[in-house]
């Protein structure tokens, strides 16, 4: 692969892409930890952030519907359960 990409911008592009993806995943991890803390402390912003992160996760897991595998359907089901639970009126009232 190195011989094929010699003299091109491919190695630089792949290094930049790897750095970007690493930073993006670290950022999502921090947001998830903040959402968990907010839910643990029963803050309404934590509930909203958890719903938003579950919706984002659900959006990214939609591609698994095109390549169905029993284990790949677990993530979307959990995301739907999180969103559904946090949207219940009784749960919303607890976070107010």
Image: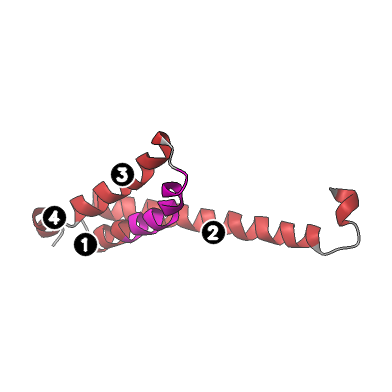
**Left of 54 or right of it: where is 63?**
right
Q: Which mark is residue 44?
A: 1
Asked whether the beta carbons under mark 3 and mark 1 sit within 8 Å of each other, the answer is no
- The Cα atoms of the two marked residues, 2 and 4, are separated by 31 Å
Residue 53's quadrant in the figure?
bottom left
Q: Main secondary structure of the magenta part?
A: helix
Q: Secondary structure at mark 4?
A: loop
Image coords of residue 17 (percent x, y): 67, 59
Range drawn in magenta? 52-67
**Left of 7 or right of it: where is 75?**
left
Q: Which colour style is shown? A: secondary structure
Give the residue pinned by disc 3.
78
Q: Which mark is residue 88?
A: 4
Q: Secondary structure at mark 3?
A: helix
Q: Earlier in the sequence, mark 1 or mark 4?
A: 1
Query: For the point 14% across and 59% down, which residue is it?
Result: 92
């Amino acid at each position: 692969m190195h011989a094929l990409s010699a003299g091109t911008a491919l190695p630089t592009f792949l290094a930049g892409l790897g750095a970007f993806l690493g930073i993006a995943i670290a950022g999502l991890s921090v947001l998830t930890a903040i959402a968990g803390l907010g839910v643990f402390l029963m803050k309404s912003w934590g509930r909203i952030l958890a719903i938003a992160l579950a919706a984002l996760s659900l959006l990214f897991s939609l591609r698994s519907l095109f390549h169905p595998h029993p284990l790949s359907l677990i993530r979307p089901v959990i995301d739907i359960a999180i969103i559904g639970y946090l949207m219940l009126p009784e749960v919303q009232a607890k976070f107010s």
